[in-house]
Image (cartoon, helix red, strand yellow):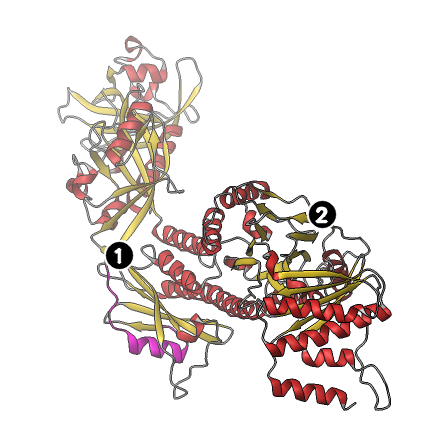
Amino acid sequence: MTGLTNSHQAGLPSPPGLLLPGATAESVIAVLDGSLRCVGWSPEAEALLGHRPDEVLGRAAGVILADATTGAGLPAVRQGRPQELGARTVRHRDGRPLSLSLALSPLSHEIDGPAWLVVAAETARLGQQTVDRAVLAGLYHESPVQLVIYGTDGRVRWINTAIQRQFGLSVEDVAGRFVKDFLQEGQILGDPQGRLLERDGRTLSDIEGIVAHVMRTGEPLIDVLFQSPIDSDPHHEHVWTCSYVRLRDEEGRPIGVCEVGLDTTDRQVARRRLALLSRASGVIGRTLDVRRTAVELAEVAVPQFADAATVDLLEPVLHGQEAPRCEPGGRPLPPLVRIAQRTQGATVGSLESARVRCVTEAGPVSDPATGALLLPLRTRGSVLGVATFVRAKPRDSFDKEDVELAEELASRTAVCLDNARRYTREHATALMLQRDLLPRALPRPTGVEIAHRYLPAAGPAGVGGDWYDVFALSGARVGLVVGDVVGHGTRAAATMGRLRTTVAALAALDLAPEELLARLDDLVAQTGAASPPETGHEDDALGVTCLYAIYDPTSRRCTVARAGHLPPVLVTADGHAELVDLPAGPPLGLGGLPFESADLELPEGAALALFTDGLVESRRAGVDVGIRTLCRTLSRTGDRPLEEVCDSALAELLAGPPEDDAALLLVRVHALPENLVASWDIPREPGEVATARSLARDRMAEWHIDEAASFVAELVVSELVTNAVRYGAAPVRLRLIQERGLIVEVSDGAHTSPHLRRAATEDEGGRGLFLVAQLTRRWGTRYTPAGKTIWTEVSSVPAEALGAAVADTLSY
């Protein structure tokens, strides 16, 4: 006699070939004849009540199964009908009470044969059985949790009602089949983090593999994501979270695998939307570039959100201009320019009218014919453009939640686009300002060859404050300057412009390099250009460095001083390149610290490279590495044109867009030919003025100076030598230089400079220097450690102009 399974007793189908735990709850314990005497006693009865068969056979069942609390035996029964005796307390053989539930089942109608089966169950187990039945019935019929039982071969053995309802399948449809046979498009997605399921060096990519692994190892697999369409909803990919555990029989042998699943499609969709927004935050707006930001939106949207996406911007936005107000019936809409397009399995049709409506109405627009969703890229009350998303069949069209997600994407993108637009405008303004402030064309003095390059910083840093300049100084000398206002943006560029103008004005005063830097330092300290910014804006200037050099082609001497700037690189004609050893000097604006200069004699044909730190310093390599690279590149200069050398240096040092402003000024020096320079020592005697005129006249004749210029030069020599003899100090020296005209210089040992003034009618003197100023192109005074030099530049003067100038001077 065997027990019945729970599922059988509940009237439920049991998984084929499987016995549920705790199956035996009721047992047949005795067989009674028509007089209710025991004629059969089962082993289950002996185990339950403790009586041996020889102790009970032939005895009345009412005595053995009497109620211990009331003493009542078995009630009268009606032949042929089942009889429920209910719960009663029966004594065990050892005297302890047992709570049993008894029932009689008829066997035969023969009077002398067996008539009844006595079925008994412990009341406690029967109550547990009732609970088990209710649980099993709930899991089978009512639970939304989906249950599948697989056999040891991975084939489906049983499914509950929840699966039958969702998939429209019955147990008969799936029993004995693999999942891949009826869910061909189903696939394992991995764990909740999207990672593959890897066990024992293998990837579990299908349900059969998962079942085999769980059967083999007994390791439960929890939260496995499975995705598949279903017949009742073919256009949506549903996702289930499944867990797998191994089943064992009463002897502990593996007999199958149970899958517990829950449809988490809505949760997965919400998670994907959050993941999309999170990815968008990390991708969109990484650069302050309008076009790149538009491309990033399209890349984020396809294919996770849409099958195709385009971004169209109003043309003024591309140039950094304010987006115009576009309203229905207002001014004509500026052109929409396609900036980004990305497709995967879909095409974007002609939606021009929808885009115009989207801009003018500043709201979402749907196009049912193409399945497109258009959203304005709107920020700060202005529409910058339109983002278009398209989904192709069989993918569902955009629902309310999708539109809200698209609006969030468009809103974030619009903010990034507006920031990029503002940066574009500010960058263009700063770049235009800097280009206007930098020299458009450098002078080409005699004795030097010049080439230069400037590259503004790429990316958010933008334009900075690097500058360079070349000045034609008195005596055929050349002034060279390179500087760096630390910082970026409009303020740095404006500061650079002020400093460059100041340096040009100070250079015109013929100041020595160290003196020029000292005066510039005072100016920077007074204006606060090098002070830390108080506003905290990124474009504030943070400091100033500068290097100034004067090269004299008549002596090949170069005097250099620097204020916190990198020293120049000197390249000799034989290819040797090295940094010039210079006193460092503090950056400008600190105040109170002296500057020192170094005096160099440059070889004929040597090159001097002045540069800013942006050329030699980057995040990839320190400044020392950059300087070595620059020296190595310049060592190959040879006789190549300096323009080619500049290009080679930039290509070698700046493989990509510069991280900081980079300026390079290359100067190749030459000595002025000796036959173009003449100088004489003049004794401090009044009679030597005529001698000086004669010497100058003879040399100008050799140089073939035209008669008008020669006449002017004689007047200048006469006046300047007379002043030096009369008011100056020894030694007096006259020098003529033929360099793009005629330069006349008179030096003496005094430091007192003559002053230009207009003589009154009754004055006997005071007209000479005024005459010099009228007849020469430029004139001035420069001071030296030994005294001063009065210099003039004489150019050809037409005879009528010469006569008018002399007459005008003599009339005072």
In this orientation, which residue lies closer to the viewer: 114 or 338? 338
Question: What residue type is disc 1 on?
Answer: Gln
Q: Is residue 273 left or right of residue 345?
A: right
Q: Residue at x 22, y 59 (%)?
A: 394
Label disc, if present, on residue 769 of the rendered structure: none
Q: What crowding class fits label 1: few (fewer than 14 Cα within 10 Å), some (14-19), or many (20 or more)?
A: few
Q: Is residue 461 above or below residue 384?
A: above
Q: Are the residues tagged 1 and 2 within 8 Å (C-beta)? A: no
Residue at screen point 26% across, 36% down: 207
The amino acid beneath tag 2 is Ala
How many numbered marks does the figure carry? 2
Boundaries of the magenta span: 346-364
Look at the image and say whether residue 261 sits in the magenta stretch.
Answer: no
Q: Is residue 86 visible?
A: no
Judge the density around disc 2: few (<14), some (14-19), many (≥20) Cα neighbours within 10 Å: some
Q: Which mark is residue 344?
A: 1
The quarter of the displayed image where residue 57 is located = top left
Which label's residue is closer to the chain start, 1 or 2?
A: 1
* Residue 715 vertical position relative to residue 587 in the rendered view, above or below: below
> Where is residue 748 drawn, in percent x and y?
80, 63
Residue lying farthest left? 110
Determine which quarter of the picture holds residue 530: bottom right
Classify mark 1: helix, strand or loop: loop
Q: Disc 2 marks which residue?
A: 584
Q: Is residue 360 visible?
A: yes
